[in-house]
Amino acid sequence: MRSRLNQVGKTPLFKLLKAALTATRLERLIQRFTDEGISDDILDQLKEEDLEKLGVTRMGDRKRLVSIFQRLFSNGVTGTAMVEVKGGTLPEDSELKGTVVKTFLIGRYPVLQEDWEWVRVWGICNGYDLGGGQANGSFAPVSHVNWYDAVKWCNARSEHEGVEPVYNCEGEIYRKGEFGSNGSKLIQQNLNSTGYRLPLEAEWEWAAIGGILREHEFNPTEIGSQTNEASLLSWRNLREPVSNELGIYSMTSNVWEWCWEHDNFQSAHRIRSGLFSDFGEKRGSRLRISRSPESRLSALGFRLARNV
């Protein structure tokens, strides 16, 4: 393997490789990779069999690393699919009734572990302080991500793809730091940017109920419709997820998801979803609760949004 890899090039170990091994909890192998001449300029050419010879014994870790390396060099070609949601007004049975929602884009899925990992690796190598992030597999929604993590990750993804980041702190792109339960107010958003961001709460709810295509309110006890018991299945139960009328998956049957808004009464930010964890009798797309921006929970992740 040494001779094949050396034909591609041998240069000093760079930050991408170290960050990737750290993200997959394989820091112990950094010296092994260094000794074999593995460096950033050849990462995207590594195969699973190469990683196995380098001491990455678990097949799952090998697949994650190959995915991270390939995506890091993809120039934004791969990534989370987005769905365009036509604007409208939230209905009378919503606590946000009358709120006008402009046309926007939202992730077809919550951010998955494999997406989280490669953006995090790129971000760490480009001045970002990004922590957290766990899941039940590469294609499961990432969780244990706090509000600060999610906002910085959105900016990192925007910068990686060459679009203007949405979030700023004291006039600079927000890349580092957490500021406690109240300090999230220091983070400002530029809603004229086309970069990645968290959904506004009204956007999240409008997408969850199907937007202008909505035919029914989500009801987990309703059997025999699109929202029957199959909607209770989720990645977290290792089952097949289902979509709503807009083709958006698992908005009310998976992890809770961070929204942008700050709840002034609780020094917290809105999270929306409603099924994986039960916070009371009221469930589904209308359920509104808040959590401190510092919270990292096993059932809390996020979904991307963008301006059209």
Image (cartoon, helix red, strand yellow):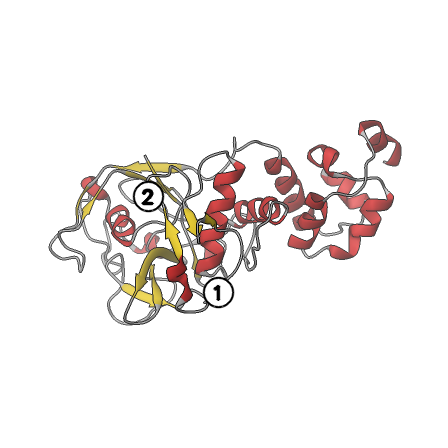
Q: Please, what is the three-letter code of the amino acid marked with disc 2?
A: Leu
Indicate whether 59 appears above or below 143. above
> Dividing the picture into quarters, in which one does residue 181 lie?
bottom left
Question: What residue is pinned by disc 1?
Answer: 298
For label 2, the crowd category at 10 Å Cα-Cα, with few meaning under 14, some 14 to 19 and many 20 or more, is: few
Q: Nearer the viewer, residue 81 or 35?
A: 35
Instruction: Report the mark closest to the observer, 1 or 2.
Output: 2
State the image coordinates of residue 40 (x, y, percent, origin top left).
Answer: 72, 38
Relative to residue 303, is residue 225 drawn left or right?
A: left
The kind of residue on which mark 1 rests is Ser
Q: Which mark is residue 161?
A: none
Separation (CA) of disc 1 from disc 2 = 30 Å
Q: Earlier in the sequence, mark 1 or mark 2?
A: 2
Nearer to us in this view, 157 or 133: 157
**Residue at the (53%, 45%) spot, across then down:** 115
Image coords of residue 251 (percent x, y): 34, 52
Secondary structure beneath disc 2?
Answer: loop
Which image quadrant: the C terminus?
A: top left
**Circles 1 and 2 in contact, beta carbons < 8 Å:** no
Would residue 131 be found to the left or right of residue 184 on screen?
Answer: right
Residue 239 seen anywhere in this rendered image of the structure: no
Q: Please tell me which residue is depicted at 63% across the width and 35% down the height of the picture.
A: 70
- Which residue matches tag 2? 191
